[in-house]
Amino acid sequence: MGQMENNKKLYVTSIALYFTYFIHGIGASILGQYKAEFAAAWGAQTLSDGTLDVSMVLSVIAALGLGRLISLPIAGPFSDKFGRRISGIIGVVCYAVFFLGVAYSGSMAVGYAFAVVGGIANSFLDTCVSPTCMEIYVNNGSVANMFTKFSMCISQFLLKFMIGYVAAANMSYRTIFIVAGAAILIDGVLILFLPFPKRNGGAEKAAEPGAKRAKIKVTPVSLAAILIGFTSSCTFMLWLNCNQELGKAYGMADPSAIQSWYALGTAVAILSTAFFIKKGLKEINVLILYPAISTVMLALCYFIQIPAICLIGGFVIGFAGAGGVLQLAVSTTAEFFPESKGTATSMVMIASSIANYTIISLAGYITKVGGTGASRMILLLNMAVTVVGILLAFYVKINRGKQTA
C-alpha cells in the first residue's frame, strides 16, 4: 500500500516536471512570435520594403542555443551527481530570470545576455525532467520522455490565442513573459518539496559514482544517436523560427496560424507515436520514418508556393519534425549509457543546442542577405540537414545490435 501511495506522489512530481516544459514551450517560441516588437525595442533599422530588420532577433533566439551549449556539459554530470531536484530548481530560477529579463531588455546586447540565461535554464531542466520521468515510468521510458514534448506543444498551440488575447486587451507584449516567469516560479516551489524517484528505478543503484563514470564510453554508434539530436533539432527549429516569413512570402494574411497547426501536428504525433511504440514500433524506425516525411513536406513547401501549403507544412513538420524525434533520440542514446541518463541526455542536448546556435545564426544571415527569397533558401537548408538525420538513423539501426550485444 505504501509503495502504491509513493507511486501516486511520483505521478504528481511528473506533472509538476511536465509543467516546466509547458512553460519551456512558450520560452522556445515566443521571441519568434514577437520579432517586430523586439526589433523595434532594440532600435532595428527599417528595410526598403518598410518592415523592420528582424535578423537581430533571430541572433538572440540563437543565443538560447549558446546558453545550452555553455551549460550542458556541466548540467548532465551535475544532475547525475547532485540529484535531479537541484538541477530542476536551477532551471526554474534561470527561466524566471530569462522571461523577466528579456521582456524588459532595452537593447539587443541585454536581450542576448538574458537569452543565454534562458538556454542555461533549458539545460538544467533537460537533465532533470527527462531522466526523472524515465525513472518514474521505468517500463515506458521512451513514451514518458516524449510527453515532455507534448507539454511543450500544448503551450505552443495555446500561444497564438494568448497573443491574440493580449493584443485584443491592449496589454503590453511583455504580459505573457511576466505570467510565464511567475508560473514557473510557483511550479518550482512544488518541485522543491515533491518526492523524486530513486535513481535508475531502484535503491541499489543510488551509489557507485565511480561505476557511472567508467561507463561513459562514446562509440561510433552512440555518437550517431547523439548527432540525431543535431539534425532533428534543425528540422523543427528552422521551421519554428522562420515559418512566419515563408507565410508572408506566399501571401498569407495571418502567418501566425502556421504556429497553431504546427503545435496541433506535434500533439497528434506524440499521442499516436506513444500508442504505436506501446504496440511494438521500434524507436529507431520512427527516427528514420519521421525525418523522411519532413523532407518530403519541406520539398513540397519549396515547390508549391501557395498560402495553404504553409498550414499543411506547419501540421506535417509539427507531426514529423517536432513530434518527439528529439526525445526519442534521447531515449535511444540513454540505452547506450543506462547508468548515466543525465549525462546521456546532456550529450544529445549539446548536439541540439549546437543546432540551435549555428543553424539559427545561419538562418539569420540568410534572412539578412537573401532578400525575398530567403525563406525558400532556408527550406533547402532544412531539407539537406534532415536527410543527414535519416542517414544517421539508418547507421544506428544497422549497427546498434553490435554495440549492445
Image (spheres, rainbow, N blue to C red):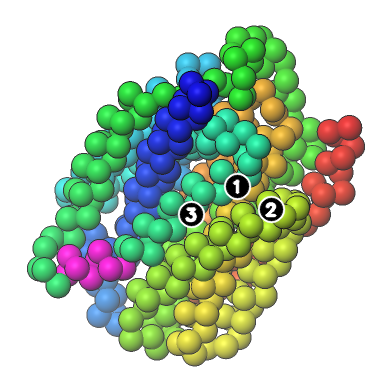
Q: Residue at x 37, y 42 (%)?
A: 20
Determine the image quadrant of residue 208.
top right
Determine the image quadrant of residue 222.
top right
Q: Residues within 10 Å of mark 1 (few under 14, many from 20)?
A: many
Q: Residues within 10 Å of mark 2 (few under 14, many from 20)?
A: some
Camera-side mark, 3 or 2? 2
| Secondary structure of residue under mark 1 | helix
- What residue occupies the far left of the structure in this picture? 170
Position of 197 with respect to 104 (left or right) is right
Q: Position of residue 249 (x, y in %)?
A: 42, 83
| Secondary structure of residue under mark 2 | helix
Q: Nearer the viewer, residue 313 or 378?
A: 313
Q: Amino acid at mark 2?
A: Ile
Q: Position of residue 102 (x, y in %)?
A: 24, 47
User: Which segment is the magenta one?
Assistant: 160-167
Residue identified by numbered label 1: 143
Residue identified by numbered label 3: 150
Residue identified by numbered label 2: 277
Position of 59 with respect to 345 (left or right) is left
Q: Position of residue 118 (x, y in %)?
A: 35, 41
Q: Position of residue 144 (x, y in %)?
A: 56, 43
Of the numbered discs 3 and 2, the one sitting upstream in the chain is: 3
Q: Amino acid at mark 3?
A: Phe
Q: Name the magenta segment's main secondary structure.
A: helix
Q: Give the quarter of the figure containing the C terminus.
A: top right
Is 269 contained in the magenta span? no
Q: Residue at x 40, y 58 (%)?
A: 154
